[in-house]
Amino acid sequence: MFCAGGSLDDLLRRDQPPSAAYAGFLALAEAPVPTIAAVTGAAIGAGVNLPLACDVVIAGESARFDPRFLDVGIHPGGAHLWRLAQRVGPQGAAALVLCGDTLTGPEAVTHGLAWRCVPDDEVRAVAVRLARQAADRSPRAGPADQGDPARDDRAAGADQVPMTARFPRRGLVAAREPQIKHSFG
């Protein structure tokens, strides 16, 4: 799947609610399987929503994350602010959205927006390798499919955020070869 950003014409259409423009990102965020974003080049505006909706982000050295919603006078929809703050913290989200800051691929790793930054020509291979690893794991190895907040691992003494809070409604499925639906040169 590829997305550099949203169409401003679509985002500003009056014949459909603004949420319609973000439906795909929201559906991706609720996918019942682990999702991996492979980012090279610019992810601008709503294009930042795609990696934010994924479980793992692999950034290329040329990646640039640039929300820029306010530059064009639109509200960052599709749970953008919430998801961004979950990744880079409230201050990082404010710097990116309110101040117009951007992150490069290496900076995205430093600030928690991406898991790894690799040379651009390796991004796809790394993403596919991680997808295969996820597909090969036992369904019991991942977070609970229910996303039940009552399963708080801190109750058992762990001082980390429970997996169910980080990955709601996600579980690993039976091992299978990853399927790449869309690829653009």
Image: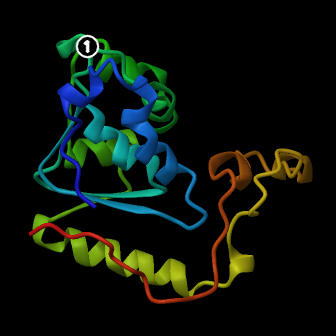
Q: Is residue 126 above or below residue 10?
A: below
Q: Is residue 143 above or below residue 131?
A: above
**Which corner quadrant holds the C terminus?**
bottom left
The amino acid pointed to by label 1 is: Leu
Quadrant in the picture for residue 49? top left
**Which corner quadrant holds the N terminus?**
bottom left
Question: Percent x, y for residue 17?
Answer: 43, 24
Q: Residue at x 33, y 78 (%)?
A: 128
Q: Is residue 101 above or below residue 32?
A: above
Left or right: 44 with respect to 55? left
Q: Check disc 1: other Cα within 10 Å, few if <14, some if 14-19, many if 20+.
A: some
Left or right: 172 with respect to 110? right
**Element at badge 1?**
helix
Q: Residue at x 40, y 63 (%)?
A: 36
Quadrant in the picture for residue 73? top left
Q: Which residue is mark 1?
A: 70
Q: How is the image coloured?
A: rainbow
Quadrant in the picture for residue 104? top left
Question: Percent x, y for residue 135?
Answer: 53, 82
Residue 14 or residue 86, whichever sits in front: 14
Q: Residue at x 42, y 45 (%)?
A: 25
Question: Percent x, y for residue 137?
Answer: 60, 84
Q: How many marks?
A: 1
